[in-house]
Amino acid sequence: MINKLKLLLSGVILVNTSTWASVDKLLPKPQHIEVLNGKCNTSRLKPEGLYLQDELKDLLLRQGYTIDNNSPIVIRTTIVPSLPKVYFNKLEAYRLRIAPDGIYIDALERTGLYRGLQTLEQLMISAEKKTELEACNITDWPSFRMRGLMHDLGRSFIPMSELKKQVKLLAQYKINAFHLHLTEHQAWRLESKRYPQLTEAKYMTRMPGKYYSLKELKELADLCKSLRITLIPEIDMPGHSSAFSRAMGFDMQTPKGKQVLKDILTELAQSVDVPYIHLGTDETSFTDPLFVPEMVEHVRSLGKKAIAWNPGWQFQSKGIDLLHLWSSRGKGMYGTPSIDSRFHYINHYDLFADIQMLYSSQVLGVPASNTNVMGAILAVWNDRYVDSPRSIMLENNVYPNTLALAERAWLGGGSGYFDSQTAALSPMASTQTREQFVDFERRLLWHKEHVFANEPFPYVAQSQAQWYVSPVYPNGGNLTSVYAPEVQYFSQVKKHQYTPPLEVGNQDYPYERYSGGSGIYLRHVWGNLCYGLIPNTSENSTVYATAWVHSDVVTTAGLLFETQNYSRSESDLPPKQGTWDYKGSCLWINGELIPPPHWQNTNSKQDLERPLTNENAVARPPLQINLRKGWNRILIKLPIGKFTIPEVRLNKWMFTAAITTTDGSKALPHLQYAKPPIK
């Protein structure tokens, strides 16, 4: 099996679809594509088959195709006994054949047929002509059985209409798990008819009165089921439960508390058709050693499977059905499938660097699911109050990150794990890793334009960018100290020397590292656990980053810029007016100092109930910058004092710098970044 897996994954890498008009826009990319001669005339189509006919007809009508039962061109769905060259995860496997005489989808199960329909719909959306599709054979299957997204609804509230819209969008990309964290210290968001006090506004400390009825949750579960998505409701216990204690007047780990929870779990299981119930069990002290085993047993007695976080309760063999790993300390257990969310908390992600790691990383360090690895779920934690669903989706870059996971977990493979790999555009990444990310980015941005045009989708192209970084200069705690790159820069721009040199790494251009991309961690937010451009970083240091950018014309452009990406789960203070951060960072373009925006938040005391405003680049209009015709020189000064300071717990040593159109919607076209070699 291992040899077969290696062969299959190597085959994926060798697929080249660059000349195919619609096939090369598929996301996730299928495991195997064979482009054939000829085309299928799709002006009129005749649906045939015993399976998924309603879904098929809905697809055709949704995409504006004509259904004609007299047409000679058929579109047929068939359940078959076997699919050659599909060795695992067969439930979702399918074969799609487009030929001059029709379109044929074969699968072993209905779910596989549905996955084939999703691929067909993408081909229809991206077809150059509405009346024809290119002939091809696609054989496809997921490498991982679970590919999902989690929302923290206990600490926030997203209207049900928005959740339904999200699952409809994500289903198109074969996401198959939607995890809802429904209870927290701040609020209990799920109706209980037996214990209505749980959702009374007076017991909620955030967004009081907002919750989901059992009927609404059932509707969402039914929608998810029709989209072949598994809804996973979570009732976190016995921790993260202050809202429960306020409403009930007693703790979960009491005889009365346990009985109430069993009643709630029964009510949930009887009201909503879901296969799993997530029990949490993280970040708490256990005063009753029987609490967790009793809850797991009760969930199982209801015909459901139980999921729990790890780290959390220490389960024995067969003590839980699925483990959900939530930090670098999360450990799987042999014989029990695990869900990987260890480095998948996108509330800490920046806009450009982390998506490279996410896309390139294997899932839990393996190329495909096995008995111990189920898949991965991205998580969005809102410890800090967020005042709108749009802000959640925008500042966490939810759609781009989820599509990156969707492809990696479908295709499998990857180049190492988060704690043992580099960013896809870094100089240490392999050519193959870089090329795969560049191809993914191309397809991602096509879908941004054609599917997510009205959704918060802040990602823009970054693979064209190249930055050079200086040696590290110990600053002794003086964040204003000036070093050679700054002196040389101003000497050169004073002489109007904007043209890139033939090489760097000399006295005039003291740069010793380079990296692609528009977001670069010098030191990752998780320190040495994850890749940063500078190894073995030290506090009280200064570096400089520079780029040479060529424009064909004099123009005004946008610039997405930040030197501190504010995590959405921290209570960090905003920068002081007139500064970019608490580190002393500076930005110059052609010698002109670029000032920071006016910060809307001005609080001097940390407060999780005060939402972020314009601290992050994606939450404000891009800076408006002037570019010369010809070469432009950018310099960023990046000092760091302590990695943790009173104002900012995670004092990130990083920068984001993306030159965009003036509205920030896409990377500015026709720019050229110089790439001189390092001496």
Image (cartoon, rainbow, N blue to C red):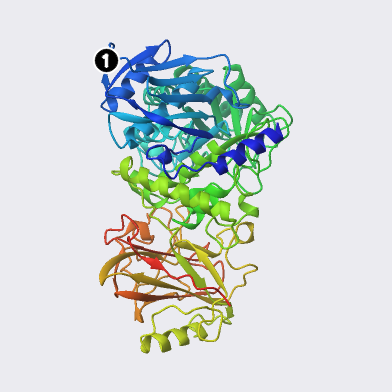
Residue at 44% over, 67% down: 563
Position of residue 642 relative to residue 414, above or below, is below
Horizontally, is 452 left or right of 489 in the view?
left
Residue closer to the observer: 312 or 28: 28
Q: For this rendering, which residue is in front, 179 or 245?
A: 179
Residue 252 on image: x %, y %:
57, 33
Residue identifier under label 1: 68
List x then y, in percent, for residue 229.
46, 27
Number of numbered discs on residues: 1
Neighbourhood count class around disc 1 (C-alpha, 10 Å): few under 14, some 14–19, many 20 upward: some
Quick check: 629 above or below 198? below
Q: Position of residue 474 (x, y in %)?
A: 59, 80
Work out which quarter of the rendered image holds the C terminus and state it.
bottom right
102 on left or right of 431: left
Name the one closer to the observer, 629 or 441.
629
Q: Is residue 89 above or below residue 423?
A: above
Residue at the spot 59% in from the left edge and 39% down from the top edge: 11
User: From this viewpoint, is residue 653 visible?
Assistant: no
Report the amino acid beneath label 1: Asp
Say which element carries label 1.
loop
- Residue at 46%, 83% (x, y): give it: 486
Residue 168 image-quadrant placement: top left
Horizontal side of residue 584 vs 364, given as left or right: left
Q: Which percent across, then down, holds residue 641? A: 54, 74
Left or right of residue 93: residue 558: left
Q: Can residue 369 be seen in this snapshot?
A: yes
The quadrant in which residue 446 appears is: top left
Which residue is painted at 41% across and 46% down in the image? 444
